[in-house]
Every structure is written in C-alpha cells, then in structure tokens.
Image (cartoon, rainbow, N blue to C red):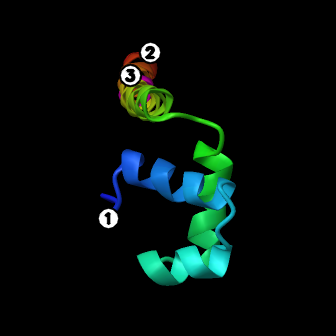
C-alpha cells in the first residue's frame, strides 16, 4: 500500500518531535494516529533521508528476492510430484 507521506516527510515529522514538539500536536497537524507516529519513530528514528531511502530500497529488494525464492520452491515441489508419480 502506498503511503500518503514520503520518507522525507516522515523523517521531517520525526525531527519535529526530536526538536521538542509534542506527539498530540504533531499527530493533529498531520492527521495521523499515535500508533502510526510511534511505528514511524521506531522504524525511521535516528535516520536521515538518504539512510531511510536506502532502507526502503533494501526492503523492496528483499521482498522481490523472497518472491523469487517462493516461486522456485513451488517449481521444485511441482517437479518432485511429477518425478514421484512416474515411479
């Protein structure tokens, strides 16, 4: 699901919190719930924009590789079932 906020915007929101703004003020201004803010804080807290972008790229690559492995596993299972039926 595509986020309404870019990674740069999320980093900016977290920096506002680190500079002393309260969570209720931030969540009210940006229209997010507290859980969303704290999830972002745990995931992106302490990162700058370039590190967060790299993290996102690595997550996308990891997702793609997991999909490839799952497809290969299905292919292997199909081949095993064909071989077992022959004997």
- Marks 3 and 2 sit apart, C-alpha to C-alpha, by 23 Å
Measured as percent of width and height from the top left, residue 61 is found at 39, 25
Residue at x 68%, y 50% (from the top left corner): 42
Q: Which residue is mark 2?
A: 87
Residue pointed to by mark 1: 4
Q: Nearer the viewer, mark 1 or mark 3?
A: 1
Res 36 quadrant in image: bottom right
Q: Main secondary structure of the magenta part?
A: helix
Q: Secondary structure at mark 3?
A: helix
Image quadrant of residue 46?
A: top right
Task: Indicate yes or no whether the magenta region holds residue 72.
Answer: yes
Q: Which residues are magenta?
A: 69-73
Sequence-wise, the earlier of marks 3 and 2 is 3
| Residue behind mark 3 | 72
Is residue 19 rendered to the left or right of residue 76?
right
Camera-side residue of 36 and 12: 12
Q: Earlier in the sequence, mark 1 or mark 3?
A: 1
The picture places residue 44, in percent across and down from the top left corner, at 58, 44
Other-residue count near label 2 (Cα within 10 Å), few / some / many at <14 / 14–19 / ≥20: few
């Amino acid at each position: 699901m595509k986020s309404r906020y870019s990674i740069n915007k999320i980093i900016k929101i977290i920096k506002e919190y680190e500079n002393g703004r309260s969570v209720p003020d931030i969540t009210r201004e940006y229209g997010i719930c507290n859980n969303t803010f704290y999830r972002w804080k745990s995931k992106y807290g302490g990162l700058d924009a370039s590190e967060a972008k790299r993290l996102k790229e690595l997550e996308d690559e990891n997702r793609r590789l997991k999909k490839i492995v799952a497809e290969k596993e299905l292919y292997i299972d199909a081949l095993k079932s064909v071989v077992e039926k022959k004997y």
